[in-house]
Image (spheres, grey):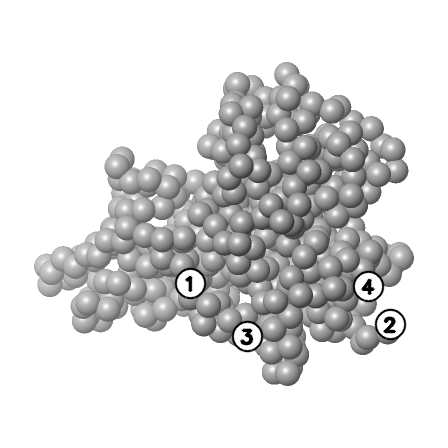
Amino acid sequence: MSTERLAKFIVETSYKALPGEGIKTAKEAIVDCLGCALVGYADKGSKILIEYARERGGNPEAGIIGGGFKAPASEAAWVNGTLAHALDYDDVAPITAGHPSVALLPAALALVEKHHLSGKEVLLAYIIGYEVMAAIGKACALRHYLLGWHCTSTFGSLGAAAVGAKLLKLNLEETRMTLGIAASLTGGLKQNFGTMTKPLHAGNAARNGVVAADMAQRGFTAVQDIMETPMGFCKVFGGGEELDIAGATQDLGESFQISSTLEIKPYPSCRGTHPSIDAALGLRKKNRFEIDDIAEVECHGSAWIPQSACIYSHPKTGLEGKFSVEYCVLRALMENGVSMKHFTDEKVMEHTIQELIPKVKYIPDPEAMLFTPFEVVVKLKNGRVLSHKVTSLTGDPSNPVSQDDLHAKYRDCAAAVLSPQEIERSLEMASNLEKLKDITPLMNIITKIEAGR
């Protein structure tokens, strides 16, 4: 019944059924994701994948962001999803324990560009995919994440499959087949956090969704009850536990999760490092001291955070620094801010940072929830003890990033690829996506492809 309920939601939900606040949140997430993909274009791992796709060739169906060429839709989704997650600057949703937009949007853009569909269809498919991910996350995220799966790739593959099924206008049976195919394509291990393979997980999810929907449309078969069956997605990816997927999917279409659960990132690092950054910046704002005066730093937060954000207690590379509370809290204390420039190998290996990292201790707080409350305590050599606690994170629904800050982030990221004029034109289009009858003009800008090619 759960797979059928998911499929019915995908097939039957119309644009008119979407809540206005959900459409607003989706547009903000899409702007954010496009910016992250544009700045991700320059990443070393992205360059490798772009050249790989260029050499493979194939039918020119959809553009590679920043690349100046088109590839098959599945390949475009693969590359663009990886670009969007390359810097770990993209949005998150705790309900999914992952990053929704980097799986959903690249799949949508590839199919919409291939079939010359509208901005409204992007928004509809994106929100449907988000709600599917959220429902699966409600049932599976806790157990799934603790087992070591990267939910962006696993739940993201099913969310992207929902996107593909909606955009290809598949019927109920074909949509159930799409979910079944995608469930067997999915994978992604948390052990690869801090390497180029982590963003590849997002690209894989986007591609899996496109491939699954395309194959189902052609008549390819899969089990029709893949979510609830004894050897299906929930039981296997839940480590054999009985997970309540039926309860998690019960209110699909009656209420929407997107506006109350999606979070825009203010810092380009694992979301689990953000409580330490926010707390450190708050502490710095209230107190004057020199970095050399620090004797010890304590981070008090939930036992969940080390699962993703203390993977590298003593990082040696920029990528590892993105998954190190130790590095991020020190960088925030040193710089009064954390930005893209701070996640290079050179910055992570600075002598002052490397000397201080062993002085940072993470102390689990049994009363803390997923991210908050979180407290940073700085003990100085002269005996002074300074502290600051945060109870909500910058970017979560209770403390959202402002539209001005979101647009500033987009402009900063997009400048890696686009001219000032292209930045403003693409921002205007993406911010008013529902008005685009055909998404091709926007894609031409962000993929650097001349109109008519």
What residue would you read off at disc 4? 70
Q: Secondary structure at mark 4?
A: strand
Q: Residue at x 77, y 58 (%)?
A: 117
Which residue bears the numbered disc 1? Answer: 401
Of mark 4 and mark 3, the one earlier in the sequence is 4
Element under disc 2: loop
Determine crowd level at label 2: few under 14, some 14-19, many 20+ residues with C-alpha closer than 10 A: few
C-alpha gap between disc 1 and disc 3: 15 Å
Whether label 1 touches label 4, CB < 8 Å: no
Q: Residue at x 46, y 44 (%)?
A: 94
Find disc 2 in the rendering and name its residue.
Answer: 453
> How far is disc 3 from disc 2 in space, using C-alphas?
26 Å
User: Is residue 399 visible to us here?
Assistant: yes
Q: What label does residue 411 carry, if any? A: 3
Q: CA distance from mark 2 to mark 1?
A: 37 Å
Q: Is residue 280 above or below residue 163?
A: below
Question: Which sits earlier in the primary sequence, circle 3 or circle 2?
Answer: 3
| Disc 4 from disc 3: Cα separation | 24 Å
Disc 3 residue type (three-letter): Arg
Residue at 59% x, 22% y is 235
**SS class of the residue under badge 3?**
helix
Is residue 435 toward the left or the right of residue 294 in the image?
Answer: right
In this view, the mark in front (1 or 4): 1
Residue type at numbered disc 2: Arg
Q: Earlier in the sequence, mark 2 or mark 1?
A: 1
Badge 2 vs badge 4, beta-carbon distance below 8 Å: yes
Q: Is residue 66 visible?
A: no
| Percent x, y of residue 399 | 36, 57
In terms of sequence position, does the residue under pointer 2 or pointer 4 come before the other?
Answer: 4
Place residue 222 in its image quadrant: top right
